[in-house]
Image: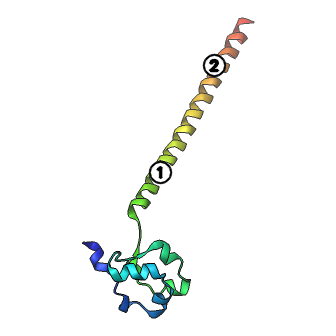
Amino acid sequence: MENLLFQVNIEDLPPEVVDNLSDDVLQQLKDGVIDKIPEDAFELLPARIQDLVPAGLVESNPKFALILAVIGVLAVAGLVFAIVKSTIKVAVFSGIVAFGAWYFFFQNQ
């Protein structure tokens, strides 16, 4: 239902925007196949033309953004886990070496 709030009416768009949109996007908008300008088609427009398009008319992909956010969180968690694991390895190895050094030091006295 929220897509109806930003439904594109071709006549309401500035002529510069209509002239710079590809024919297939314009036809899909006219036929009602899509109700927003796809983000990839929007990015192909020149910067001065992009400023003329209302923000609500550009279709974004929130599912893709959510997937990227989850991947980013997992990557950071993996990094932290790897750092902690490496720190524990170094601490255990250093402890074993220290124990051996103390053991041999007191054996010779």
- Residue 13 lies in quadrant: bottom left
**Residue 77 visible in the snapshot:** yes
Q: Amino acid at mark 2?
A: Ile
Q: Nearer the viewer, residue 55 or 7?
A: 7
Label 1 CA crowd tier, 10 Å (few <14, some 14–19, many 20+): few
Q: Is residue 59 above or below residue 107?
A: below
Where does the image place residue 45, in percent across and percent down from the top left?
53, 81
Find disc 1 in the rendering and name its residue: 71
Classify mark 2: helix, strand or loop.
helix
Location of the N terminus (image quadrant)? bottom left
The residue nearer to you, when weighing 105 against 96, is 96
Q: CA distance from mark 2 to mark 1?
A: 37 Å
Q: Residue at x 51, y 47 (%)?
A: 75
Q: How many marks?
A: 2
Height in image: 97 above or below 12? above
Check residue 96 in the rendering and tell me which mark sits there, or answer none: 2
Q: Position of residue 40 (x, y in %)?
A: 49, 72
Numbered label attached to residue 44: none
> Colour scheme used in the picture?
rainbow
